[in-house]
Image: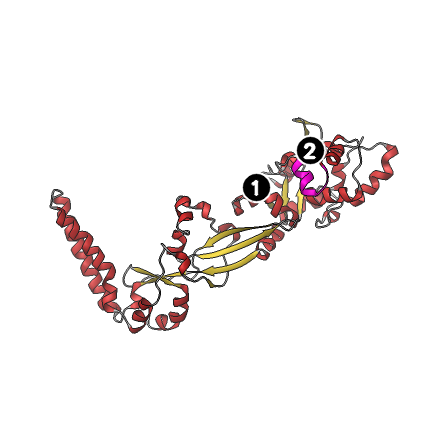
Amino acid sequence: MLELNENIKETLRARDMTQKQLASYLGMSECSLSRYLKGTRMPRPEDAQKIANFLGLYPKEWFSGVDTENEEQVNESRTLLKPSRQAWEKLRTWPEAVEALATTHTLSVQDICQILHAPRSWVNRFVLPHVDKIYLPDGKRAGKEVNTNWKEVAAIQLGKDMQDSTWCNKEDFENLIMGSILSVTKQTKLIPAELLVQDKRAFAEEYNSYTEKMEELVGYLKQYPDSPMEKYAELANLRKLQKQCYRRQLSNEGRQILRSNMPSAATPDKTKSIPVRLPSVPIEKWIAPEDMKDFAELEETGHKYFFRNGYVRILLSFVESNGNAVKKMFYVADAETLYHKYVEEYVLISEEVWQMYAIRLMSRR
């Protein structure tokens, strides 16, 4: 008896999809798909190919038992059910599949969800159709084990957790991500304030003198917490003067930079985005805006945290089979972060201005 019914249902459960969603995605009527699920009709060749390409199942897993009178029709479907982008023809034996799971197909769908900060349904639409994958049936139907649990077999042989049913080729995934990059840009650069001054040592001395005054005043206020408010205001004013003291010792380049359009997190759109090289940071280390605790606030102000800290912005575009596209954004810390030598005070300038003055500023460091 043809068991296409339970095979598809099991896969739908694993991918958190409904029968209606699958029919719409594959461009076939829900009625036709329903008949395939009930086992009352063999899929038409074109429908069989669509289903195979989407679900990525090993052809033999679709038919665990067949009536002899339908054998010729089933053999034809077995040939048609070979996914076009899959390398199933190279994985005919279980040892070969295990070898692939240990070496090339090491990325589970759950891993991809975590890396891209996306739900499983999103990954099913925009990632899985474009990567080679291995599906491990758990052998359950209606909650009962009726066949071999290949996830358990793989877990025992490989000695690792194999809870996920679908395992993707890591290289395919990485190539997909790199091929989906629309732009790599940067708006701002955080530089040590000492790069903008004429005499760095004189700047450090003045800066440290403010530090000593503030430490002395803090000690006094701890001893006399009921001091007049003027004393606390004096402390705040000292900090303000300290932060601005580099402006009193600017070099020629420093003056020119401060006369340019300085970036503001309040109006990030007014700062030009400049194309930069993609940092050599693993994809799993890219930062999604959702990672930030204050994401709601960041969304309202143009991701001001990344803006104020000179992060690189990576914009990706994913396209599904029907041509619909969706964009995702990630950030990476500046690979060329500059650290102070004399004074721990930093100034935010635009990336455009930095690229204009970088050589001159760094030559005098």
Verify CB contact (< 8 Å) between mark 2 and mark 1.
Answer: no
Q: Where is residue 20 in the image (x, y as percent from the top left)?
A: 67, 35
Quadrant assignment, res 251:
bottom left
Residue toward you, 245 or 160: 245
Compared with 108, 340 (above or below) is below
Q: Nearer the viewer, residue 85 or 299?
A: 299
Q: Quadrant of residue 239?
A: bottom left
Q: Does the magenta stretch include residue 180?
A: no
Tag 2 residue = 9
Question: Can residue 259 be seen from the camera position used here?
Answer: yes
- Which region shows up in magenta? 20-29
**From what the image shows, is residue 269 above or below residue 30?**
below
Question: Which image quarter is the C terminus in?
Answer: bottom left
Q: Among all residues in the image, which is located at the extreme right?
A: 69
Which residue is located at x 23 percent, y 63 percent? 245
Which mark, by number, is residue 110? 1
